[in-house]
Amino acid sequence: MRYFCFSLILVSGVVGNSNNCDYKYAEVLYKSLLFYQAQRSGKLCFMDPLVSWRKDSAIDDCGRLGEDLSGGYYDGGGYVKFGFPMAFTTTMLSWGVISYEHGYCIAGQLDEAKRAIRWATDYFLKCHANDSVLYGQVGDPQIDNECWGRPEDMTMERPAYYIDAANPGSDLAAETAAALAAASIVFLEDDPNYSKTLRTHAATLYKFADKFRAIYSDSIPCAGAFYRSTGFGDELVWAATWLFKATGRLPYLIIAEQMYQEFGLGYTSGFSWDEKRLGVDVLLAEIKGRCVYMDKLQDFCDTMLTKKERTPKGLLFLGEWGSLRNAAYVAFILMKAADLGLNSVNYRHLAKSQIDYMLGNGGRSYVVGFGNNPPTHCYHRSSSCPDEPYDCNWDTFRGCQPNAHILYGALVGGPGPNDSYSDIRTDTVHNSVALDYNAGFQGVLAGLIYHGFETNNICQGGVCRVED
């Protein structure tokens, strides 16, 4: 279904957070997309004026045979392009658009969301050099971590790492297939030829992932210190399910359900770049209706609702590193479960409470450039660097000064179990940013707008004006 915002729309909705604040979800959605602009590598285009401090960088990234590997996204505060979390981010951004397209439309951000997705998929098409070769990383993390400066000034070696039949990576190949399949749905009506290209590459990558089974971080060891995979079974099922949704071909659904049993995909405590089982349960529940997948999904959501540990101020706490990222993905699963008719009021209220915590109900904003007392010292090289001719180096990193540029929309890692948080650049556990941090968060924002929780924006002609 396609949505059009041609007429004047006053968006009114439910006020549901405990402090009776009306957070401007459309504004946060817009700024979240600015964060993705700031993370772009390669030759830049379609840049918002608020991200004008970013310029072309790493335009000479290339593969072993000289393949053009420019483009894509820097992962977080550094300049390595990690394919595994980038692919998951792309799958999630696509899922958010597929699920809540009208929310994006109301906020006037649908076109920008599609540009964010296409920036990644264009890069993945380059990385898929042939049927059994996929580049999964550009840049050496150890070399990258030795430097603090602007991406435009990089001079270090940027090696490219790939998987192939001799050194496979089923999880990486399958997650990239899932990303391309999900994105093909996003572009189906706007650009059917591009959508077909994405589906073709997704299908080929899936065959490669299934035929040569291995964990990708064993083949690209330097990724392991940052994004070590714990298995590939969930990615194979996840990708097969997305291919079914993208193509309608029944064999993919049969494969997905068979592999679900083969790999014993049981209960899980979360949803992330490494753990896709909850996402599989949602997709298969959507396809199959009331079934074991729906029951498992409801069990998880009920546990989050009634039993899961929370901080004193109400954040679902699933781990110290990236605590807000973890809660945002749970919120996305809660929103999708509610869409399936499972305890809709309570699940959506809990999802909303988690987003509202991030926007200010936790005592401060955890989104850069938004709300009350937002982070100003996030661990992020390019935004920390002042414009030339001023130097940017490790003294910049260690300094107490705020980052020179506002990294609008970036969700930081977040607080500890007692809501404790310090806005310190050197605290990578709590003040890092990353592609995957914003993906689930952004999807929930679009869902809240879609379901009428946005109360502060007027949409005219498809473009929303955020009121002060």
Image: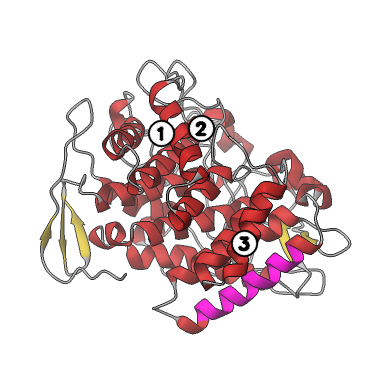
Counting from the top left corner in percent of width and height, residue 309 is at: 46, 19
Query: Which residue type carries mark 3?
Result: Ile
Numbered disc in front, either 3 or 2? 3
Magenta residues, dominant SS class? helix
Counting from the top left corner in percent of width and height, residue 326 is at: 50, 35
Query: Which residue type carries mark 2?
Result: Asn
Query: How far apart are the alpha carbons under marks 2 and 1?
Result: 8 Å
Give the magenta range: 194-209
Is label 2 in contact with label 1 (beta carbons under 8 Å)?
Answer: yes
Query: How far apart are the alpha carbons under marks 3 and 2?
Result: 43 Å
- What residue sits right under mark 2 in the picture? 431
Q: How is the image coloured?
A: secondary structure
Residue shown at the point (80%, 63%) measured from the top left: 211
Residue shown at the point (78%, 49%) measured from the top left: 215
- What residue sits right under mark 1 in the picture? 375
SS under mark 3: helix
Counting from the top left corner in percent of width and height, residue 119 is at: 52, 67
Query: How far apart are the alpha carbons under marks 1 and 3?
Result: 47 Å
Query: Which residue type carries mark 1?
Result: Pro
